[in-house]
Image (cartoon, rainbow, N blue to C red):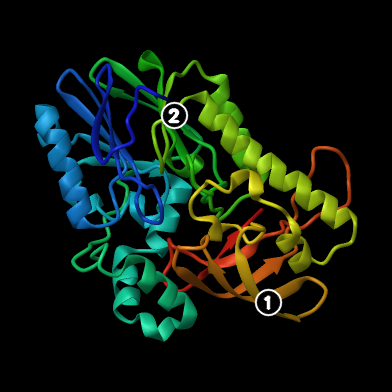
Amino acid sequence: MARWHYRRGLQDIGNGCYAWLQPDGGWGFSNSGLITDGGETLLVDTLMDLAHTREMLDGYRAAVPAAAQIGTLVNTHSNGDHTFGNQLVAGARIVASRACAEEMAQHTPEKRSAMMRNWRDYGEAGAAWHDLYDGIFDFDGLVYTPPTETFERELKLRVGACEVELTMVGPAHTRGDVLVHVPSTRTVFTGDILFIGGHPITWDGPISNWIAACDRILGWDVETIVPGHGPITDKAGVRAVKHYFEYLTAEARRRYDAGMPEAEAALDISMAEFRDWIDAERVIADASLRVQVTSRRLGSDTVDLALHMRHGDTGPWTSVATARASRVALTPAAPAPAMPDLGVMFFNGADTGEIGRAHV
């Protein structure tokens, strides 16, 4: 959207809605939102650490005096770059889906802090996160601050006279993804259902749920869409993300039907159409990456992959520890043989040493 400049900091998107953007939207650099009406406030997500969250809150408060006291915080999902700053609004009503709250309890900021201090104990995966975050985010002093209220599928909130609709669309990016829809302003804050200009990563899936979430947004009368990462967009951005997943699903299906082994199929899919999107290491199938693969058969259902992926020609090497392509059902709409998600098991950014599945 030409009228929105993708720059760091506050964006007034009108009608009492604001966004806080963090270019370039890569690992850990997420967006947040603020909805205000009648002296009341609702914050959409906190950020990765206290310094970034504090700067964000100061920015909102400078523009909106009512933001001096955040009444409600909605966590769109459990990842640390959307929840680890919660303690700075600890007096607020904190709302999340039940699945999000369960994941937050499993992957607390204290565990992340311990992992970052002892990153050498986690092998290549620990080295990867150290390389990504060291000197950028400070995980010391973080305190687990969970939701005070959870819901299952839908919940309506009020901010002054403004109605805000929460819709749980997970499992997709994570188990408990939530869309924050403000019908009266034709605005939606999507959390990580949308990565604009960057490759998404799927910690949970299935992909069909992610596509359905895009369809839900496209079915709403919305004009301004604030993604979890990347610039403010409109429905064209939603359609681009939906196309990305439809393309990967179709390409994976063809290779599965042809009997291609999982690892070979994942590396065979061309991602040239998305070469300008950042964080291509999130998709093993990206043919523009130089991927060094060591594999060994563990049986008919799994292949272990030791991956070292370079992001383009100038980006840093990202070490991703032992990755696993698992045969997990990616159920097509029409009856067909069960098909695996052709993906990899990445070291989960929301976790503390566990492995998360990136489904494609």
Among the two numbered marks 1 and 2 on one chain, the one whose residue lies closer to the N terminus: 2
Whole-Å distance between the Cαs marked 1 and 2? 38 Å
Placement of the N terminus among the 4 image quadrants? top left
Q: Position of residue 189 (x, y in %)?
A: 40, 32
Which residue is painted at 88% across and 42% down in the image?
335
| Amino acid, disc 2 | Thr
Measured along the vertical axis of the image, is residue 249 above or below residue 346? above
The front one of 301 and 252 is 252
Which residue is painted at 25% across and 68% down in the image?
135
| Amino acid, disc 1 | Asp
Q: Position of residue 338 (x, y in %)?
A: 83, 54
Which residue is painted at 21% across and 49% down in the image?
53
Residue 74 lies in what quarter of the image?
top left
Badge 1 is on which residue?
304
- Is 201 positioned to the left or the right of 77 in the image? right
Which residue is painted at 43% across and 61% down in the image?
350
Badge 2 is on which residue?
233
Label 2 sits on a secondary structure element that is: loop
Measured along the vertical axis of the image, is residue 324 above or below residue 27? below
- Is 336 positioned to the left or the right of 72 in the image? right
Q: Mark 1 or mark 2: which is in front?
A: 2
